[in-house]
Amino acid sequence: MESNKDDKKVLPNKLERHKLFGSVIPGPKSKPTEKEQMADLQNSKNDYLFDLDAVGISNVKHPIQVTSTMNPTSQTTIGTFNFSSTIKKDSKGTNMSRFTEQLHAYYQDGKLNVTLTDLKQYTQELALRLKSNDASIEVHFPWFFERKGPFSEIAGLNHADASIYVDYTKESGFNIRVGLTGSVTTLCPCSKEISEYSAHNQRGKISMEIDITDNFDENEIDWKYALLEAAESNASARIHPVLKRTDEKMVTEQAYENPRFVEDMVRLVAADLYEYSFVKAFYVACRNEESIHLHDAIASVTYNKNTEH
Ligand SMILES: Nc1nc2c(ncn2[C@@H]2O[C@H](COP(=O)(O)OP(=O)(O)OP(=O)(O)O)[C@@H](O)[C@H]2O)c(=O)[nH]1
């Protein structure tokens, strides 16, 4: 390597640098470059031994639009998608480019609104595009909502993790599941009972997944708000982004007045979901990040309102 008089390095140009690190000049190429002449392995037909439950792509991140009854009523957030369909054993593979091709088409048309109506249309169109009888999509996204201090009413944004699963089959139509994981404060009833003063508390993560009824109208009910309310209204206290002293006193006392075990949490949330008429079946889990242990405390319940167990 050369140096100039100011002792500054004189670097080889970029092409030379790439050669230095192992890049080689492209060799002769004999395979077709026209799509029509290229081998199409994924569309080969043979007996490939097994039908597949799902083939597709996962962990696809993309901006999406979300609407809500809470402020902000409209927001852009990041969705993480899984897209798939089944394939029969006579087919070697799926056409993977079509998954992201459709995603970009919807984005360009301004149709990436994560509403149940739009996602149903999306899933049905995906099946058509794949020339398949079925398609499934799953999207997870952070949903932001305004939360005010209980006394000061000073606002900030909280967030919960929302998810939507849409399964479509030509024969039986749509199956939709939605989910939400939100955070709450829980104060230990046992600790309150046995101690002369104070009680330990923790941050609880409440995860809910629900199968919704076929006639569910998302314009009438904001499922994200409904699930958040089921979690928060049953907790020892809600969690806030901004708390002044006046607020802090209120949430501390409220938590002490409403102690909850992890078991209490899932049962109380289950009771609210049982009462929601748009819920067919549900799963509720609570994970308390214990402040007196390094481990977490967990509880969960699944229930189907049709079979009543
Ligand atoms: N089936 C399959 N495809 C893969 C796999 N790994 C990568 N690919 C994808 O193969 C894709 C290209 O194949 P296709 O989507 O069938 O492309 P194409 O035949 O030009 O597309 P169409 O005209 O829509 O049929 C690329 O997007 C790669 O991501 C894999 O394990 N299985």
Image (cartoon, helix red, strand yellow):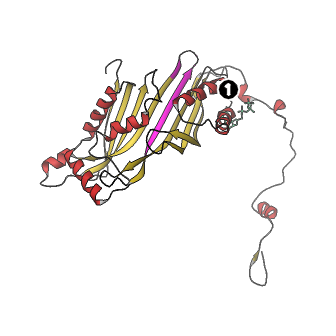
The total number of labels drawn is 1
Q: x%, y% of residue 8?
A: 74, 79
Apparent side of residue 131 relative to residue 12 in the rendered image (left or right): left
Res 221 quadrant in image: top left
Q: Residue at x 28, y 60 (%)?
A: 245
Question: Closer to the camera, 24 or 87?
Answer: 87
In the rendered image, which quarter is residue 38 located in?
A: top right
Q: Which residues are magenta?
A: 159-174
As drawn, the residue found furthest toward the top would be 171
Where 147 sits versus 120, above or below?
Answer: below
Residue 47 versus residue 136: which sits nearer the camera?
Answer: 136
Instruction: Say which residue appears at 80% left-offset and 69% top-offset.
Output: 12
Q: Which of the four quarters of the rendered structure image does ligand 1 lie in?
A: top right
**Which residue in the structure is indicated by mark 1?**
129
Task: Inspect the magenta stretch and tell me whether residue 254 lies in it.
Answer: no
- Residue 307 in percent (x, y) is at 34, 17
Residue 154 in the image: state x and y as whole percent. 37, 55
In the picture, the quarter occupied by the C terminus is: top left
Q: Amino acid at mark 1?
A: Arg
Q: Is residue 78 above or below residue 82?
A: below
Query: Is residue 181 depicted above or below 89 in this figure?
Result: below
| Left or right, residue 79 beside residue 131 | left
Q: Assess disc 1: are there few (<14), some (14-19) or many (≥20) residues with their C-alpha within 10 Å of its C-alpha.
A: some
